[in-house]
Image (cartoon, helix red, strand yellow):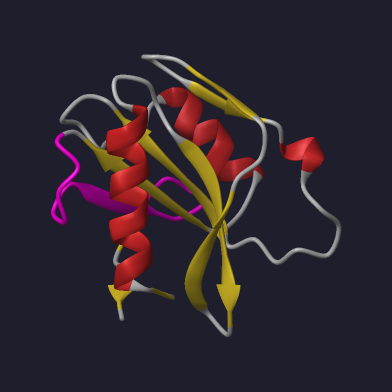
Amino acid sequence: MKMKKELLKAILESAKSAYPYEFVALLTGEKGIISELVFLPSISGEESALIHLEMLPLGLRVYGTVHSHPSPCCEPSEEDFFLFTKFGKVHVIVCYPFTMKDWKCFDSNGEEIKLELV
């Protein structure tokens, strides 16, 4: 799986804008390349973000999720692990201070995976 570098930059900017609250969105694209964010109604706080997945348009290909941690820790929480198992195959977490090196990617089992930037 690959992700557009420009999309990661947009994700980091979204996280900075939401800080000190969490930001959450879905990841979509074409032909195995994640290139767009899908924003659904959500509720964000300093320790969590809830996204209304029931409002996802039918037929939309979603590769996974992305959300921010307003702390310098990109490790998934118990709630993150639950989301990973329920929706998508690729899950990106960006963390404070939201630079190009402050992110990790996980599979649906919560195992860290590499995501190539293109």
Q: Residue at x 18, y 33 (%)?
A: 96
Is residue 67 visible in the rendered image? The answer is yes
Q: Quadrant of residue 105?
A: bottom left
Q: Main secondary structure of the magenta part?
A: loop
**Residue 112 seen in this snapshot:** no
Magenta span has 79? Answer: no
Q: Nearer the viewer, residue 112 or 67?
A: 67
Residue 5 vs 38, above or below: the answer is below
**Residue 90 appears at what percent x and percent y?**
48, 58
- Considering every residue shown, the one lying at the far front of the view is 17
Q: Is residue 84 left or right of residue 20?
A: right
| Image vertical order of residue 45 relative to residue 69, above or below | above
Is residue 100 shown left or right of residue 48?
A: left
Q: Position of residue 101 (x, y in %)?
A: 13, 54
Q: Residue furthest bottom?
A: 31
- Measured as percent of width and height from the top left, residue 41 is found at 67, 32
Note whether 9 is above or below 85 in the view shown.
Answer: below
Quadrant occupied by the N terminus: bottom left
- Examine the structure image and report whether residue 111 is included in the region drawn in magenta: yes
Residue at x-position 31% and y-position 30%: 69
Depth check: give the residue in front, 77 or 116. Answer: 116
The stretch in magenta equals: 97-112
Q: In the image as oriented, which residue stretches furthest toward the top?
A: 46
Of 113 and 43, nearer the camera is 43
Residue 95: image quadrant is top left
| Numbered-mark total | 0
Specify the quadrant that holds the C terminus.
bottom left
Q: Does 31 sit left or right of 45 as displayed? A: right
- At 45% from the left edge and 19% from the top edge, which residue is drawn? 48
Residue plotted at (30% across, 25% down): 19
